[in-house]
Image (spheres, rainbow, N blue to C red):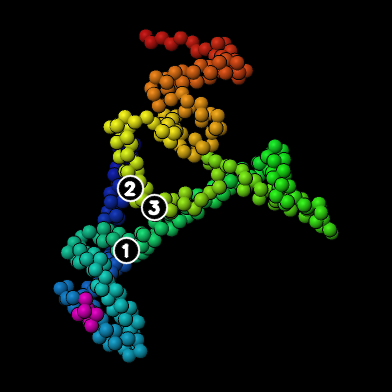
């Protein structure tokens, strides 16, 4: 019984192999018919040679097109022949297409590779890469600006809801003579008056509120498009800044100025200029006064931060619950025999 099953499997495999080999030439012929001028030679279709230049091919195409135009040539295959002539010319007038076709003529056995190269040329979008890059950069820049504008509006809305900022804005509006909405009531509804008051307060806050960091008012010069445009200038500025730094502080050993102290403090703390600006002024002054760019001072600072975090965690209810859980559910000892 087992021998019979073995013979059956061998017969099935043999039938599949024979069927595949029989079908393969037909599949290859079908692929060839779809490529270039099909079973015909594109050079022969136009009556030219492989070494002929574009001008010769163009003249041959015009001559053949006039001769076999459907309005003149009345044969049954007029339309088909005219399309074949046009297709041959489209292939031979394009340098890349012609090189691919010549490669196929020289290597007729590589059918599937020719098929891939032929359709890659037609399916691939003919778009200038520079246009793609420009559109991408523009879209990213637009998203950057809109995101920054959204964060800025959130900051203004928060200030409008905060009673402290709101009262200050009302006082500023009164001092400027803008807070006269009660005298202009007339026939307006309460909603209209309130909307005008909110608009006045927003205007005052936008003019007087110093918003820094990631919530500051966005500028078009901060987006990717302008950053790339001005990148050569930024590179030159950085080179001059770096050379100046080496000369002043490495060679002449001059003391650090206020800007240099802020820069060194930021770099030691790993803060960007935007994040540094968002810190309270008292915290900035504290960091600067501790001279954190000196390694010993920075080690002391980090040790203090770790101790503060440990004390804070020790007094935290969640941390206490975690320690209690780990004490009661600690894993059993593992042994390896």
Question: Residue 30 has which mark?
Answer: none
Which residue is at a point 53% across and 40% down the rendered structure image?
213
Near mark 3 (Cα within 10 A), the count class, few <14, some 14-19 or many ≥20, is: few
Relative horizontal placement of residue 189, taking residue 34 as reference (left or right): right
Mark nearer the viewer, 3 or 1: 3
The residue that label 2 is drawn on is 236
What is the x, y in percent for residue 305?
A: 50, 20
Q: Is residue 55 magenta?
A: yes
Relative horizontal placement of residue 153, taking residue 272 as reference (left or right): right
As rendered, which of 47 and 157 lies closer to the eye?
157
What secondary structure is the stretch in magenta mostly built from?
helix
As rendered, which of 330 and 178 lies closer to the eye?
178
Which residue is at a point 17% across and 76% down the rendered structure image?
52
Q: Is residue 166 visible?
A: no
What residue occupies the far left of the structure in this picture?
51
Quarter of the figure that contains the C terminus: top left
CA gap, disc 3 and disc 1: 37 Å
What is the x, y in percent for residue 88?
A: 27, 75
Q: Which residues are magenta?
A: 54-60
In this rendering, the answer to whether 318 lies above or below 284 is above
Which residue is at a point 29% across and 67% down the rendered structure image?
35
Q: Is residue 253 magenta?
A: no
Quadrant hosting residue 3? top left
What residue occupies the far right of the structure in this picture?
187
Relative horizontal placement of residue 143, taking residue 17 as reference (left or right): right
Question: Residue 230 has which mark?
Answer: 3
Which residue is at a point 43% across and 36% down the rendered structure image?
259
As rendered, which of 283 and 79 lies closer to the eye?
283
């Amino acid at each position: 019984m087992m021998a019979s099953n073995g013979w059956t499997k061998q017969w099935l495999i043999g039938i599949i192999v024979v069927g595949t080999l029989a079908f393969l030439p037909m599949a290859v012929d079908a692929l060839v018919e779809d490529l270039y001028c099909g079973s015909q030679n594109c050079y022969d279709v136009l009556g030219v040679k492989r070494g002929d230049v574009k001008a010769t091919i163009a003249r041959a195409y015009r001559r053949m097109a006039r001769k076999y135009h459907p309005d003149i040539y009345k044969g049954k295959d007029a339309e088909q022949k005219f399309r074949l002539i046009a297709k041959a010319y489209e292939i031979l007038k394009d340098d890349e297409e012609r090189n691919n076709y010549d490669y196929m003529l020289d290597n007729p056995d590589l059918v599937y590779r020719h098929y891939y190269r032929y359709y890659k040329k037609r399916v691939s979008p003919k778009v200038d890469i520079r246009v793609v890059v420009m559109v991408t950069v523009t879209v990213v820049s637009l998203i950057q600006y809109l995101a920054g504008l959204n964060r800025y509006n959130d900051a203004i809305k928060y200030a409008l809801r905060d009673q402290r900022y709101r009262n200050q804005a009302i006082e500023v509006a009164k001092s400027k003579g803008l807070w006269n909405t009660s005298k202009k009531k007339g026939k307006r509804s309460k909603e209209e008056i309130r909307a005008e008051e909110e608009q006045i307060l927003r205007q005052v806050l936008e003019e007087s509120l110093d918003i820094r960091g990631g919530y500051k008012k966005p500028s078009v010069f901060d987006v990717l498009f302008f950053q790339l445009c001005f990148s050569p200038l930024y590179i030159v500025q950085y080179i001059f800044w770096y050379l100046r730094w080496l000369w002043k502080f490495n060679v002449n050993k001059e003391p650090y100025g206020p800007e240099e102290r802020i820069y060194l403090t930021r770099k030691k703390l790993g803060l960007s200029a935007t994040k540094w600006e968002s810190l309270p002024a008292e915290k900035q002054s504290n960091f600067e006064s501790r001279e954190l760019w000196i390694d010993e001072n920075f080690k002391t600072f980090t040790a203090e931060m770790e101790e503060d975090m440990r004390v804070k965690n020790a007094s935290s209810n969640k941390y206490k619950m975690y320690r209690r859980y780990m004490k009661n559910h600690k894993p059993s000892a593992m042994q390896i025999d």
